[in-house]
Image: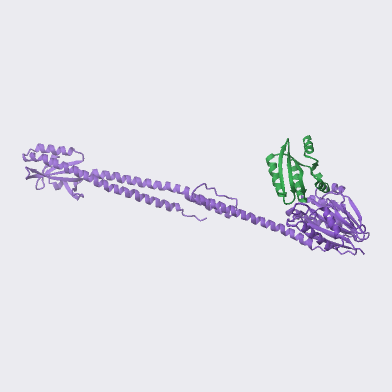
Chain colours: A purple, B green
């Protein structure tokens, strides 16, 4: 990220200058006020002193009592800051001075005028060195005769000293203002620029893909609010992302499912001379479930099987996929159903589908001798319509499901049943989606109801019969959602 | 509610009572609740009392088998009690006894566990 000139600097400068102006502005006003006030004080004092001297020396000057005059002048200079006290005649010659040595000199030798104060008092350089304010008062005797002019000088340093102090303080305050502005900068960074940096950092991290990041800003001001809003936004993004992921996962599931379902729906069974085989399949909304097939075996026999994978979702669909591939191969490899199922079982266990079992109903049809060999791996009954008895019976060979036991154990549990198929007989293989179908008031369709309905409509040809059964189940479960696949295969031996 | 699950602790066994139906619509509830119960009780032996369970679909059995295998990995065990006729039929048909033992009643199941 490019180096950014911090707004801290700008704000710092602004604060600094503002403080500077305020402090110094105040300082200068105080300065001017002080100066004026001091000046007034000094002038008042000076004028007072000078009047005093003029009054006191008047009589002594008259009688030329020089000593007394000198005493008075000397006394005056004892006063604080009084630099000189002298008396000058009409021509500017010094006739009396606190410093006797300066008598007979010209006043303009000692005093050099510089300027005047606001009130008109002259500010002069005394003896070329010191700045003084000069106060003068004519000395009058008996109210008329001008005996001379008293000059008293008060050092200007009184005022310059104070001014120096004020200047010093102003510099001090400017320095403090400078330091404070640094302090202000730290404060600013804590309250403004750092949080802003945190927000920028956070935005960067989230932008790079980490949607679990939350900004920790425990402030209750606008920045805290901004952080909160930001965090909420990230949470929403995460939810949307998850939903997106879920959507993608679901789409994938549906893709697998629909591929399998398509293959089931499109299955074309081999043609047999004396037999017809029809199938019906209606998938439930969710993935995973039933599948079936009719395979021609090498020795002119046919294998019919219908299977039900337990569980739901992608794992079940994967197992279905797997078995769809394995079963025909195994059954073709060995014409022994039980052996084939044992192999299929071990294949499934090997693949590590730990929590899924499969029920399988398989039958090998031998058209030569019209027999059907049935092996049931954990599957429920098969319905058989016997044309000669005009009744429906059930068959359910002993067995166990695939995916639970070891192959050898499973094989020992499977029993084969060989049935004769006579003209007009019909075998109905189905999965439990039919008998488990639930009605609105909680009843299950059940085997008995299927048996009855089968019997009732047994004269119909296979495909019509299967459709009727489906309609009946639909009617029964109207108002409820189908949660299980419905699959049926009907094997009929022609009547003639 | 299709399925309701309650638990009670009896000696070193947790008995879980099932009421209603266990099919694909209630399987996720079952999974969640059982996880909760495992965490709360920290128990190892669970008896599923199915007396008031009217129906178990293949999805339901699959879920039970699933949980049973999971808990075996964690060193525990699930026992079934009070299966009705149709549940028992499927239990026998599929061969679930290789994975989970069943008992006539909760009492009988407890006896067997306490003997361990």
| Residue A178, image x, y percentages | 39, 48
- Find the residue positioned furthest to the right: A369
Horizontal and vertical percent for residue B110?
A: 77, 37
Where residue B76 sits in the image (x, y, percent)? 74, 40
Q: Residue at x 73, y 36 (%)?
A: B12
| A201 lies left or right of A400 | left
Q: Could you say which is closer to the camera, residue B86 or residue B112?
A: B86
A129 or A186: nearer the eye?
A186
Residue lying at the far front in this picture: please name it: A441
**Vertically, is A24 above or below A332?**
above
Work out whether residue A354 can be spotted: no
Q: Is residue A15 visible?
A: yes
Compared across the picture, whether B106 is left or right of A146 comes to: right
In the image, A307 versus A297, the foreground residue is A307
Q: Tell me: residue B112, above or below residue A494.
A: above
Q: In the rendered image, which quarter contains the C terminus of chain A?
A: bottom right
Which sits in the foreground, A142 or B76? Answer: B76
């Amino acid at each position: 990220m490019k180096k950014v000139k911090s707004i801290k600097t700008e704000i710092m400068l602004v604060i600094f200058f503002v403080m500077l102006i305020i402090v110094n502005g105040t300082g200068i006003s105080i300065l001017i006020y002080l100066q004026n006030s001091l000046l007034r004080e000094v002038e008042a004092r000076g004028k007072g002193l000078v009047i005093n001297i003029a009054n006191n020396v008047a009589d002594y000057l008259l009688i030329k009592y020089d000593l007394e005059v000198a005493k008075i002048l000397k006394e005056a200079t004892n006063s604080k800051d009084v630099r000189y006290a002298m008396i000058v005649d009409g021509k500017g010659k010094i006739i009396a001075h606190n410093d006797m040595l300066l008598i007979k000199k010209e006043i303009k030798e000692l005093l050099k005028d510089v300027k005047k104060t606001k009130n008109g008092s002259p500010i002069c350089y005394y003896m070329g060195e010191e700045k003084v304010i000069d106060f003068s008062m004519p000395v009058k005797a008996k109210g008329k005769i001008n005996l001379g002019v008293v000059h008293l000088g008060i050092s200007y340093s009184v005022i310059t000293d104070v001014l120096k102090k004020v200047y010093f303080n102003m510099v001090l305050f400017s320095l403090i203002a400078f330091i404070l502005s640094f302090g202000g900068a730290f404060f600013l960074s804590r309250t403004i620029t750092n949080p802003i940096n945190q927000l920028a950092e956070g935005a960067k991290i989230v932008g790079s893909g980490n949607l679990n990041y939350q900004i920790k800003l425990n402030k209750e001001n606008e920045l805290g609010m901004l952080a909160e809003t930001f965090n909420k936004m990230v949470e929403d993004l995460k939810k949307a992302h998850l939903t997106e992921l879920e959507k993608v996962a679901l789409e994938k599931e549906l893709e697998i499912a629909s591929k399998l379902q398509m293959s089931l729906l499109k299955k074309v069974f081999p043609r047999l001379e004396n037999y017809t085989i029809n199938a019906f399949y209606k998938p439930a909304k969710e993935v995973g479930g039933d599948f079936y097939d009719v395979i021609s075996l090498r020795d002119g026999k046919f294998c019919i099987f219908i299977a039900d994978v337990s569980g739901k979702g992608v794992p079940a669909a994967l197992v279905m996929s797997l078995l769809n591939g394995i079963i025909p191969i195994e059954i073709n490899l060995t014409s022994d159903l039980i052996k084939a199922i044992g192999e299929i079982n071990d294949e499934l266990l090997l693949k590590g589908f730990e929590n899924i079992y499969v029920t399988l109903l398989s039958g090998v049809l031998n058209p030569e001798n019209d027999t059907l060999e049935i092996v049931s791996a954990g599957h429920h009954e098969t319905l058989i319509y016997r044309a000669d008895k005009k009744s429906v019976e059930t068959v359910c060979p002993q067995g166990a499901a695939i995916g639970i036991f070891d192959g050898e154990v499973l094989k020992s549990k499977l029993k084969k049943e060989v049935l004769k198929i006579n003209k007009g007989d019909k075998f109905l293989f189905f999965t439990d989606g039919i008998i488990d179908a639930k009605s609105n008031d909680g009843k299950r369709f059940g085997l008995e109801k299927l048996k009855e309905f089968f019997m009732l409509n047994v004269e119909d040809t296979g495909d019509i019969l299967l459709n009727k059964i489906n309609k009946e189940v639909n009617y029964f479960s109207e108002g409820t959602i189908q949660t299980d696949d419905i699959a049926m295969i009907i094997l009929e031996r022609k009547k003639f | 509610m299709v399925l309701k699950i309650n638990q009670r602790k009896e000696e070193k066994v947790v008995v879980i009572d099932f009421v209603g139906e266990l099919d694909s619509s209630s399987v996720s509830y079952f999974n969640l609740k059982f996880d909760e119960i495992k965490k709360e009780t920290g128990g190892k032996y669970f008896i599923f009392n199915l007396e008031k369970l009217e129906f178990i679909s293949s999805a339901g059995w699959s879920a039970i088998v699933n949980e049973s295998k999971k808990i075996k990995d964690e060193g525990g065990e699930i026992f079934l009690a009070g299966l009705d006729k149709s549940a028992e039929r499927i239990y026998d048909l599929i061969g679930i006894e290789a994975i989970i033992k069943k008992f006539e009643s909760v009492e009988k199941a407890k006896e067997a566990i306490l003997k361990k």
